[in-house]
Image (cartoon, coloured by chain):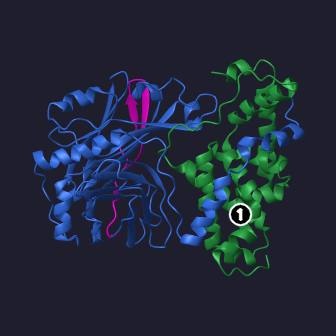
Chain colours: A green, B blue
Amino acid sequence: LSVRFTDRTEVFIALIQPLLQSAFALAMVMLGDRPAAEDAVQDAALKAWRNAWKVAGSSSPPQSWFLTIVANQCRDTRRTRWWQVLRLDEMPENPQSDHAERVTAELDLDRAMARLSREQRALVYLRYHLDMQPKEISTILSVRQGTVKSRLHRALRQLRNEMAPGSKEETDD
Amino acid sequence: MTDPNPDLLRRYFRGERFQVGATLERRIMDALADDPRVRPRLWPRRLALRAVVAIAVLVILAVGTTLPVAATTSPLASGARQILSTVGMSPVVERLMTTQRQATAAGHTVSLVGVFASNAQTIIILKVAPAAPPGSGWFKDVRLIDASGAQVEVQQGEVTPDYAWMRLAPIPGVGSAPMKVTVEVSASFGASWTLQFDTATQGRFLPKPAAGQAGKDAVAFDSVVAAPGALAVDLTTRGATLGSFCPGEPADPLGPTGVSASCTHEIPSLSKDHGADAASSAGLWVYDANGNPLTNISPVTISVDRRMLAQQELLHGGVWQLPGPGQYRVVFTAPDGATLERTVRVEG
């Protein structure tokens, strides 16, 4: 990154703003709660500002660098012991649409994703939404490349199993 | 079978749920432009009403009991010590030096009346005098700033017209070296107060009591920490459900989409007759050598996440006021009434 930051607003515009959507989505994927995700991204943005000088000499792309901070922030949040119940958004019970099949598939996926661990959801998001390669994902999630591949494989297998006919009754309360 | 193909996954992540809200960008901009320290997070969404009980109990103590103040070399100012003793917490902060224990603005004085800091949590109790009118918003925002200028995350809290109790994340590095910590409180009517304390001494990890069985529950101690004036106990049980300790909680507290859940025990009554009753209630209790239950500084919280749920595990943790050195009994009572009792010795 060749930008020399002179004030905080410039930092945000140059560095954080273009990454805000992907950062928020990652936090949302990991935490499953919008206020918690917003808090995590806000805290991550402040940490990014404090460490903005590091990125200038870093070989990591700014996106990986910032998403690493976001992922770590989400992990720190996870470590806290005093949470109340966190739930994903309510899902519609009876989707009525011309694309009912597609919607049903997405609801099945929604339920199946909720069954994954946060790390697994983050893996799937980084790989299939941001199209990141295992090497970059390994940097963000602080795991080895081989671990990324194996965990991704297990996550997809679990998703398939969860979405298989007959598993829905088991997942619904 | 519906396969989670890449297109379906991409469509899923493009869903409205994952779209950043309109206010987040402004919120971050404000935080960046305003101060190197982050604007305080929104006040906890679901406040623990029982925390009020904790404060009330402490106030009652001030009227009804005289607590011994251990001899100490603490640099805590005598005035601060008196303030702390008024809520029965004088021993708790022997480990702290308060350099700015109170501040006055808009006719209200905010005092730091209790702090417990460990590597797992930070608990702070503030008092405002005269009491603010209900709804006046004397405690609109709070920041706890560590020595590096970073803000410590607020996790839970409760506010009354004259007290504020809050539980925060651990202060980074609190176990490594003394440091100055700043508490900033701002009111909705424009007033603000800045207080400071220095962490001076540290608590000690006591030997973990032996694991054991309480009825159907396996009990393993995670840590027992004694600080001057405070005893923190954390343990993990395997076997019982969250609902069996916290009436009203569903059998599956996480449901299909939950991530983690916790409930908070009520602070037990301080009446001497309550000790025996308390021991028969499910939960974690600490008694002195005479069988008197210790006072909670922080209510016992029981928590579970999805991994622990699968293992039928629960985390129990609480902090009690420690009158001084001596032997204390830690009692875990299982939902079926069976108990596990261990003795911990706190040296002087």
Pointer 1 local density, CA inside 10 Å: few below 14, some 14–19, many at least 20: many
Position of the C terminus of chain B by quadrant? bottom left
Q: Residue at x 39, y 69 (%)?
A: B181
Please identify the quarter of the rendering in which residue B27 is found: bottom right
Q: Residue at x 64, y 56 (%)?
A: B24
Please say if B16 is above or below B276.
Answer: below
| Of residues B30 and B310, the one drawn nearer to the viewer in this rendering | B30
Can the viewer see residue B1 in this picture?
Answer: no
Residue B190 is situated, as x and y percent measured from the top left of the image, at: 39, 64
| Of residues B68 and A151, the one drawn nearer to the viewer in this rendering | B68
- Which residue lies under the disc numbered 1? A66
The stretch drawn in magenta includes residue B201? yes
Residue A30 is situated, as x and y percent measured from the top left of the image, at: 67, 46
Q: Residue at x 66, y 61 (%)?
A: A69
Can the viewer see residue B97 in this picture?
Answer: yes
Q: Look at the image and give the residue range highlighted in magenta.
A: B197-223
Position of the N terminus of chain B by quadrant? top right
Please identify the quarter of the rendering in which residue B228 is found: bottom left
Residue B136 is situated, as x and y percent measured from the top left of the image, at: 35, 52
B154 vs B310, left or right, is left
The stretch drawn in magenta includes residue B243? no
**Secondary element at tag 1:** helix
Please identify the quarter of the rendering in which residue A21 is found: bottom right
| Of residues B58 and A166, the one drawn nearer to the viewer in this rendering | B58
B33 vs B71, left or right, is right
